[in-house]
């Protein structure tokens, strides 16, 4: 027996849309087996993971709050991945964005008078810091041909250590009883809540606005066209005169900026101060979201909500069913693997044929 | 006396380099066959968890090491199925593997957190191991160190002195031509991926069985990624991998000693040293070979289906 893959003359749009759904069903099935092995009823786990979080207002808000940074980062990453550029350091760009923007929040603490400029400045500084941090791997790739995969990933560890140092050292609240955290930001340095007494804040609107903007850019502009051409056929893109270097800088700037903005939105939104760690791995989870959403912004939005749902559900399952949080992570990794595998259905006619290895053809 | 101190330092350098050498040798073979497996970190951390769990349950370090290698092998089989079998994107599949490995290792190791066991036994040859200055370094290491050395020699010999090795390298350079010659491209690639997985798992088991004889979540701390960088740094050559790993082991040890000595630098800056050193090494390497083009296997990272 061998697996026979025959390329389709064109991608099947139906199967391309269906394959993530199939992958999700497959992952839920395998996850169910794993849950049963851990001694928990798969039906109860399914309810806790995917249904209960949708049934209450506070948990719906939590899902939206988790989905927002994921959607924002993944949308930025989609530009990179579509152009065959592998920025896997979004986690680092997120952290640096949160740190730099949060620094503004710390420095302006206690300002009197007109303070409306503080929040926009924080968002701007956070975004630019993310862009600048993403420029390091982009520059090294364009100028020296150094693999962006390794440099962007290594910079994640550096960024995390930098934030750890700053939150415990220079930016620590001097009146904070030695707790490793900065002062709590003023109201003017916080993203406003969307409703009185709720947890949903304006960062969610920023993220969804960015997704809409990215959709327009990808489908309606020359730049978006160039990104798609570079991904589909680098050779054709070179003939068309799209510059590799400029594409690298642009894609890294977009993904770094989006991650930086997500970072400062998290710091100025939910957290409200600088702490030694500010991300539960958003930058890495966003990679799953980007592929699960098939690298298209609307798909990414749906994928971000699904992944956020599993994360909130995973937290509930840890408390209610004593299921470990690592199960959620393993599930998300499995889901990404299945999504990538299921993509084969859209690209090839797949058949299992009897007999030995494929014979070479001219 | 000072000779013994030098030896002590060298022993720690070697033990820090060992997991990097083992994991990087496996990845080197996979990449020479044309498959870029970015899941080294995930396979390594799963190998560490499973290796430790097996060793605790059976009381045998050897079985632990085998279990760790087996766990890495199983995870890499999934990767091989996706990328070699289904022609899925190698970069994204490797990332999926890392995420999954981190999650699975947490599950596998959950009930072993905080347990300790005796580190893997060290070789002891009555006279040789007690030689002043060199005895402990050359004749007193644990079995993993010698396995790492054997791997370097074995992989060098296999890739450049055997017909199968030539086939493997040819497939990594041009899968279309080798397929046309009737060579089993997908089979060789799958086996190379499995070898890489077993090595990564073994490297992880070294961490939890010999280096720090306990299991802690995410204890690989980026070593899998550093092993990947080492392969690039070494221009896909085994001996240079070993040299590079010793260099990085040296950086790690330097960092530990600097931290102990309290140089006034913040601890975080020293902890960042291996990662920054990795980036610098890659930069210096590319500065050193501005001419002559890339040394990477020509088909590295490109997917292959027999009909193309």
Image (cartoon, coloured by chain):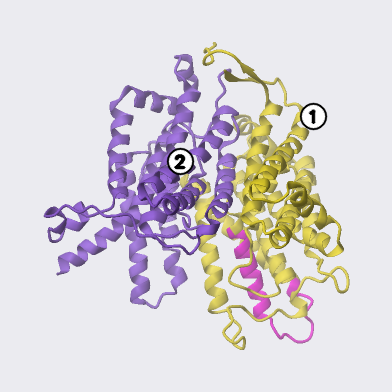
Chain colours: A yellow, B purple
Residue pictured at 69% horizontal, 37% vertical: A228
* The furthest residue to the right: A195
Find disc 1 in the rendering and name its residue.
A14
Residue B203 percent coordinates (x, y): 40, 48
Vertical side of B295 occupied by B225: above or below: below
Vertical side of B59 occupied by B292: above or below: above
Secondary-structure class at tag 2: helix
Quadrant of the image occupied by residue B181: top left
Residue A276 percent coordinates (x, y): 58, 71
Disc 1 from disc 2: Cα separation: 39 Å
Dominant SS of magenta comes to: helix
Residue pictured at 48% horizontal, 64% vertical: B114
Do marks 1 and 2 both belong to one polypeptide chain? no
Where are the magenta residues, as a range? A92-119
Quadrant of the image occupied by residue B126: bottom left
Q: Where, quadrant-wise, is the N terminus of chain A in this rendering?
A: top right
State yes or no: residue A98 in magenta.
yes
Viewer-side residue, A210 vs A197: A197
Find disc 2 in the rendering and name its residue.
B70
């Amino acid at each position: 027996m061998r697996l026979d893959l025959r390329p389709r003359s064109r991608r099947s749009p139906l199967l391309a849309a269906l394959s993530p759904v199939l992958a999700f069903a497959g992952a839920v099935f395998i996850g169910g087996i794993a849950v049963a092995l851990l001694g928990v009823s798969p039906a109860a786990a399914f309810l806790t993971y995917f249904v209960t979080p949708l049934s209450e207002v506070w948990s719906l808000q939590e899902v939206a709050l988790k989905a927002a940074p994921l959607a924002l980062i993944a949308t930025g990453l989609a530009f990179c991945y579509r152009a065959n550029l592998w920025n896997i350091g979004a986690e680092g760009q997120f952290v640096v964005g949160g740190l730099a923007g949060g620094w503004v929040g710390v420095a302006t603490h206690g300002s009197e008078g007109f303070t409306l400029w503080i929040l926009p400045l924080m968002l701007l500084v956070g975004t630019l810091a993310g862009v600048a941090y993403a420029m390091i791997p982009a520059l090294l790739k364009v100028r020296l041909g150094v693999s962006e995969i390794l440099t962007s990933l290594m910079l994640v560890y550096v960024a995390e250590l930098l934030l750890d140092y700053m939150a415990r050292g220079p930016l620590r609240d001097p009146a904070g009883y030695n707790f490793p955290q900065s002062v709590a930001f003023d109201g003017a340095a916080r993203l406003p809540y969307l409703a009185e007494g709720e947890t949903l804040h304006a960062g969610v609107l920023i993220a969804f606005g960015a997704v809409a903007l990215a959709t327009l850019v990808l489908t309606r502009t020359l730049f978006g066209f160039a990104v798609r051409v570079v991904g589909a056929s680098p050779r054709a893109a070179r003939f068309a005169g799209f510059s590799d270097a400029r594409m690298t800088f642009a894609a890294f700037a977009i993904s770094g900026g989006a991650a930086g903005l997500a970072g400062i939105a998290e710091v100025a939104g939910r957290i409200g101060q600088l702490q030694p760690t500010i991300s539960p791995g958003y930058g890495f989870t966003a990679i799953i979201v980007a592929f699960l959403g098939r690298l298209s912004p609307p798909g990414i939005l749906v994928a971000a909500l699904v992944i956020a749902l599993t994360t909130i559900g995973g937290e509930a399952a840890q408390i209610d069913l004593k299921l470990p949080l690592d199960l959620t992570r393993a599930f998300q990794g499995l889901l990404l693997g299945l999504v990538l595998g299921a993509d084969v259905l859209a690209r090839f006619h797949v058949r299992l044929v009897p007999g030995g290895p494929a014979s070479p053809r001219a | 006396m000072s000779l013994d101190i030098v030896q002590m330092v060298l022993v720690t350098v070697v033990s820090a380099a060992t997991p990097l050498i083992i994991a990087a040798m496996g990845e080197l073979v996979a990449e020479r066959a044309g498959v870029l497996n970015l899941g080294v970190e995930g396979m390594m951390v799963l190998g560490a968890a499973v290796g430790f769990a097996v060793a605790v349950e059976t009381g045998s370090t050897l079985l632990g090491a085998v279990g760790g290698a087996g766990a890495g092998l199983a995870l890499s089989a999934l990767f091989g199925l996706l990328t070699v079998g289904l022609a899925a994107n190698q970069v994204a599949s490797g990332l999926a593997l890392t995420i999954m490995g981190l999650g699975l290792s947490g599950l596998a190791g959950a009930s072993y957190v905080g347990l300790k066991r005796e580190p893997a036994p060290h070789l002891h040859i009555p006279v040789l191991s007690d030689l002043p200055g060199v005895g402990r370094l050359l004749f007193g290491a644990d079995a993993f160190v010698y396995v790492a050395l054997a791997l370097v020699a074995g992989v060098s010999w296999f890739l450049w002195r055997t017909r199968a090795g030539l086939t493997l390298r040819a497939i990594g350079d041009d899968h279309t031509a080798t397929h046309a010659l009737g060579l089993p491209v997908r089979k060789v690639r799958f086996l190379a991926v499995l070898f890489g997985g077993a090595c990564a798992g073994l490297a992880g088991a070294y961490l939890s069985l010999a280096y720090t004889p306990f299991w802690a979540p995410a204890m690989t701390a980026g070593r899998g990624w550093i092993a990947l960088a080492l392969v690039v740094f070494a221009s896909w050559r085994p001996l240079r991998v070993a040299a590079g790993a010793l260099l990085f082991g040296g950086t790690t040890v330097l960092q530990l000693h600097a931290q102990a000595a309290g140089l006034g630098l913040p601890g975080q800056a020293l902890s960042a040293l291996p990662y920054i050193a990795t980036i610098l090494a890659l930069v210096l390497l590319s500065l050193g070979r501005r001419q002559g083009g890339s040394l990477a296997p020509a088909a590295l990272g490109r997917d292959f289906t027999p009909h193309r």
